[in-house]
Image: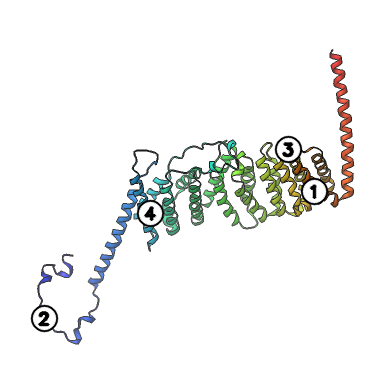
């Protein structure tokens, strides 16, 4: 404070001569001088600089990372870093003005240091993933107490910083590094990452095409080039679900190609059940916007139908049922036979869960409407499935459900059912005669060989 108003602290203690004031020059009405305004401004600047320095000091400290696996690391130092991260978050929350480059540059370096780290390779192959293996999908990250706050800071920065400033620090390389983090085994990290990634997609519109392309590359690599599971497919599909929801109608050609070349093939992998809910939402969004796309999806699902994976079969039967409800009615006649053939094959399955799920499809009114559009082609397939189940399925519950569906079919078209049943008996008689003839031929060949 030396030199403040030209008076030193030493001189300020001396008594000053007594003065008298007239109303004209009363001190109560002394106007604010330019010098005082400059001094106030300088004090405020000093205050803001001190706050910036504190923030920079905290950022510098938090740029050091811990492995959380090294026994030589100090738990107290780890806790101290977490407290400092909380301080950074608190300061950013309370700041009135936007962050400038002086703070953003070290802040993004700190974020990169903490987030962009080597991830352990997936421990489990796709073949080992079952729907009940929820604990395999979420493997806790030791550094999560720090990462949680780092993601909160990151989200706050993306929300409050201008697009022009974000563009300086978030480039293609940065986005690719973020995309790699979706392979994290920790469900909590993938959820936080999903929120940040989607916020960037919403705000930085000039990166949208690039981000969509890179997400598609992740999907295609997973489907066609690796046998390892990818923990983040579900979260990426959730992001895509909100993107598809915003598509305008009629859909663009590149959006339809995404459905055909990416979403439909995602039904192929063995571990599909892990992300099936998100995949179904994306596919349904497309069909709701353009019901005519239902044919492409249904035929694609039938093409990728599993042979021995009963969990996938149960899920896909439910997805087909949902798609039929949003399908263009003009496609009913064309799709009735392939759909009913697949459902009939499933209701004859020796796995009771698959058989029961396929039989429950016939409680759906829309499925009945679709089947009725091609009764002559569909009924022979259905009647054969019903009779085979009633004759020899091992599950009592499946036989009971089959009896119920058979009653519904007979009530719908009794004459047609009787006709199909007669044709089935004739076909079985011909097959028995053919079997007898074949056995006789083999016996003659065996006797001739002797």
| Res 18 label | 2
Mark 3 burial class by Cα count in 10 Å: few <14, some 14-19, many 20+ = some
Asked whether 417 or 269 is in front, the reply is: 417
Comparing labels 2 and 4, the label whose residue is closer to the camera: 4
First in sequence: mark 4 or mark 3?
Answer: 4
Looking at the image, residue 53 sits to the left or right of residue 208; the answer is left
Looking at the image, residue 59 sits to the left or right of residue 134; the answer is left
Which residue lies at the image location 79% right of the left edge and 40% below the top edge?
A: 389
Looking at the image, residue 317 sits to the left or right of residue 436; the answer is left
Mark 2 to mark 4: distance in Å? 56 Å
Q: Position of residue 425 (x, y in %)?
A: 88, 38
SS category of the residue bearing label 4: helix
Mark 2 burial class by Cα count in 10 Å: few <14, some 14-19, many 20+ = few
Which residue lies at the image location 59% right of the left edge and 44% below the top edge?
A: 274
Which residue lies at the image location 20% right of the left edge and 83% below the top edge?
A: 26
| Res 350 label | 3
């Amino acid at each position: 404070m030396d030199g403040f108003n030209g008076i030193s602290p030493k001189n300020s203690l001396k008594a000053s001569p007594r003065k008298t004031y007239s109303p004209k020059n009363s001190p109560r009405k002394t106007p604010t001088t330019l010098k005082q305004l400059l001094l106030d401004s300088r004090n405020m600047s000093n205050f803001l600089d001190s706050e910036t320095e504190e923030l920079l000091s905290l950022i510098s400290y938090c740029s050091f990372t811990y492995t959380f696996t090294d026994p030589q690391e100090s738990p107290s130092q780890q806790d101290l870093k977490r407290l400092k991260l909380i301080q950074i978050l608190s300061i950013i929350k309370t700041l009135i003005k936007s962050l400038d480059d002086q703070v953003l540059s070290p802040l993004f370096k700190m974020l990169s240091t903490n987030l962009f780290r080597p991830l352990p390779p997936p421990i489990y192959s796709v073949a080992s993933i079952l729907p009940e293996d929820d604990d395999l999908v979420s493997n806790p990250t030791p550094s999560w107490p720090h990462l949680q706050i780092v993601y909160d800071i990151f989200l706050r920065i993306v929300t409050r910083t201008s697009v022009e400033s974000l563009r300086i620090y978030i480039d293609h390389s940065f986005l690719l590094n973020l995309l790699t983090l979706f392979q994290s085994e920790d469900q909590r990290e993938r959820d936080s990452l999903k929120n940040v990634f989607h916020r960037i997609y919403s705000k930085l519109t000039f990166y949208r095409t690039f981000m969509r392309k890179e997400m598609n590359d992740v999907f295609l690599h997973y489907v066609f080039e690796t046998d390892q599971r990818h923990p983040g497919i579900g979260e990426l599909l959730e992001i895509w679900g909100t993107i598809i929801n915003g598509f305008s109608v009629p859909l663009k050609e590149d959006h339809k190609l995404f459905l055909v070349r990416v979403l439909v093939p995602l039904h192929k992998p063995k571990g599909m059940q892990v992300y099936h809910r998100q995949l179904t939402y994306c596919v349904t969004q497309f069909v709701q916007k353009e019901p005519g796309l239902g044919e492409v999806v249904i035929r694609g699902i039938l093409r990728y139908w599993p042979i021995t994976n009963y969990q996938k079969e149960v899920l896909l039967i439910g997805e087909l049922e949902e798609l039929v409800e949003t399908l263009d009615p003009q496609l009913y006649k064309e799709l009735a036979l392939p759909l009913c053939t697949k459902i009939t094959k499933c209701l004859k399955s020796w796995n009771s869960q698959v058989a029961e799920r396929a039989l429950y499809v016939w409680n759906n009114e829309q499925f009945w409407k679709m089947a009725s559009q091609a009764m002559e082609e569909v009924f022979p397939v259905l009647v054969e499935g019903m009779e085979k189940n009633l004759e020899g399925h091992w599950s009592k519950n499946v036989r009971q459900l089959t009896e119920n569906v058979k009653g519904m079919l007979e009530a719908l078209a009794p004459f047609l059912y009787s006709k199909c049943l007669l044709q089935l008996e004739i076909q079985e008689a011909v097959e028995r005669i053919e079997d007898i003839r074949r056995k006789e031929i083999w016996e003659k060949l065996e006797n001739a060989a002797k």
